[in-house]
Image: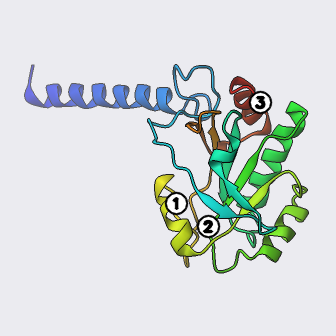
Amino acid sequence: MPLRARLALMLAASFVLLGALAVVLFAGGGTHAGGAGFDGSLPPDVPRADFTLRDQDGKVARLSDYRGQPVILTFMYSTCRDTCPLTAYQIRGAMDQIGHDIPTLAISVDPKNDTELNAKRFLNRTGLTGRMRFLLGSERQLAPIWDAYAIRPQGKGFDHSAYVLLVDGRGVRRVSWPTEKLTPEGLAHDLRLLGA
């Protein structure tokens, strides 16, 4: 077989393999194949990352306070007008489908603008007052948490990493939802699998 024909055949075979890989990776809206039945993707083994912050009411919050029950963990900023409110509505919809609240912690990605007042306004605007705690802190306090969960904070000219994470009763991150794939139905499904 001439060299040109062999190269063309190898190139065609490469495209077929890439296409098959894309189908496996992206089929099901982010579902990880063999993912123990979860609709969201399964992160690699992630070490526990506990933290201590204060919420919109000045009360101390620790991830470890919620051991024994699943927790919804997300990263938001209180003056956001698009992605963060939409994510909040999706979380609220999932809890409504389950029929009861799940401990939900939103960690600030914009410490300069995320004040107690702005956090309270955000929770009120999204209908999550009393259902979600908005955790605040200085950049120095928040940076280790962002690093532990591979989150990029809000910045000039770029948006923050937007994920909703599900942490199991042992404090281990089990499911990761990129917000563009998040649905109330999928989130509720995964929360039920975690025993919510």
Earlier in the chain: of badge 2 and badge 1, it is 2
> Can you tell which mark lies on residue 109?
2
Image quadrant holding the N terminus, namely top left
Q: Marks 3 and 2, Cα distance to the nearest angstrom?
A: 27 Å
Earlier in the chain: of badge 3 and badge 1, it is 1
Mark 1 lies on residue: 146
Residue 164, can we see it?
Answer: no
Q: Is residue 33 above or below residue 62?
A: above
Q: Amino acid at mark 2?
A: Val
Residues at marks 2 and 1 touching, judged by CB atoms closer than 8 Å: yes
Horizontally, residue 117 falls left or right of residue 159, namely right
Q: Marks 2 and 1, Cα distance to the nearest angstrom?
A: 8 Å
Q: Amino acid at mark 1?
A: Trp
Q: Is residue 163 above or below residue 121?
A: above
Image quadrant holding the C terminus, namely top right
Residue 173, can we see it?
Answer: yes
Horizontally, residue 75 falls left or right of residue 12, namely right
> Can you tell which mark lies on residue 196?
3
Residues at marks 3 and 2 touching, judged by CB atoms closer than 8 Å: no
Residue at 86%, 31% (x, y): give it: 98
Q: Nearer the viewer, residue 153 or 15?
A: 153
Q: Position of residue 101 (x, y in %)?
A: 85, 41
Q: Quadrant of residue 141?
A: bottom right
Q: Position of residue 66 (x, y in %)?
A: 70, 42
Earlier in the chain: of badge 3 and badge 2, it is 2
Residue at 68%, 68% (x, y): give it: 136
Label 3 SS: loop
Q: Nearer the viewer, residue 106 or 42?
A: 106
Residues at marks 3 and 1 touching, judged by CB atoms closer than 8 Å: no
